[in-house]
Image (cartoon, grey):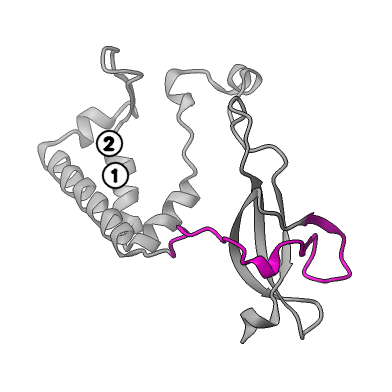
């Protein structure tokens, strides 16, 4: 995260505002099926550029010998084709990726009203909440307890009433609710 102190110590030219984690970039490229040699070529054959907004001038940085040796029509075409291929591969990777939906909340059946929510997956753990009708609950996981005979819901509880000014609900809690035998069946 950039702050005034970091900027004062590290930003000596406009393009210093751009910080790229090249190792992360390389690993992402390999995951997306992009040749790291192509990425290296793009870095070597294109200047660094920055435009703060649509009306500002471009800031450019390149090696002294870059324009004479590398700024050719062939390299420009190669870089454009390579960039388009990289974008398409990344989009294809993102399109193939699937994640579980978390669109349903847990409306506790009456048998759970008054049950304890524990700090850890154990009934001897500290009680952090008691299931009540005036809370909304989300279950994210079902986990084994420290006692192998017990299973727990990992649960988050938020009060139905919220402060209109607060970004997050006040008094939310997270913990473990013992799964009842009726639910195990």
Report whether 97 appears left or right of 124: left
| The N terminus: image quadrant | top right
Residue at the location (17% across, 43% down)? 80
Magenta-span inclusion, residue 117: yes
| Residue with the mark numbered 2 | 46
In the visual, does 158 lie left or right of 27?
right
Residue at 26 percent of width and 12 percent of height: 55
Crowdedness near tag 2: few (<14), some (14–19) or many (≥20) residues, C-alpha within 10 Å:
some
Say what secondary structure mark 1 lies in. Answer: helix
Residue 127, given in percent of the width and then of the height, sits at: 84, 59
Label 2: which secondary element: loop
- Residue wearing tag 1: 42
Seen in the picture, residue 58 relative to 84 is either above or below; the reply is above
Could you say which disc has been placed on residue 182 in the image? Answer: none
Q: Which segment did they paint magenta?
A: 100-129
Disc 1 and disc 2 in contact, CB within 8 angstroms: yes
Total marks placed: 2
Residue 63, percent from left and from top: 34, 29
| Residue situated furthest front in the rendering | 110
Instruction: Say whether residue 170 is left or right of residue 140.
Output: right
Quarter assignment of residue 116: bottom right
Q: Is residue 152 above or below residue 57?
A: below
Quote the CA–CA distance across marks 1 and 2: 6 Å
Residue 171: quadrant of the picture? top right
Frontmost residue, 178 versus 7: 178
103 within the magenta span: yes
Above or below: residue 37 compared with residue 57? below
Q: Residue at x 30, y 31 (%)?
A: 47
Residue 152 position, x and y percent, is 70, 72
């Amino acid at each position: 995260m950039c702050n005034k102190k970091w900027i004062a110590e590290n930003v000596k030219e406009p393009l210093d505002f751009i910080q790229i984690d090249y190792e992360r970039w390389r690993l992402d490229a390999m995951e997306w099926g992009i040749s790291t040699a192509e990425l290296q070529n793009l870095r070597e054959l294109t200047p660094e550029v920055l435009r703060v907004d649509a009306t500002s001038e471009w800031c450019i940085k390149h090696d002294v010998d870059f324009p004479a040796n590398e700024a050719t029509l062939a390299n420009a075409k190669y870089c454009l084709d390579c960039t388009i291929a990289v974008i398409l591969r990344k989009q294809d990777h993102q399109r193939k990726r699937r994640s579980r939906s978390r669109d349903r909340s847990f409306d506790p059946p009456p048998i759970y009203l008054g049950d304890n929510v524990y700090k850890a997956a154990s009934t001897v753990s500290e009680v952090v909440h008691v299931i009540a009708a005036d809370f909304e609950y989300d279950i994210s996981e079902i986990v084994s307890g420290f006692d192998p005979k017990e299973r727990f819901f990992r649960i988050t509880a938020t009060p139905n009433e919220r402060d209109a000014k607060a970004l997050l609900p006040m008094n939310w809690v997270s913990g473990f609710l013992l799964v009842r035998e009726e639910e195990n069946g």
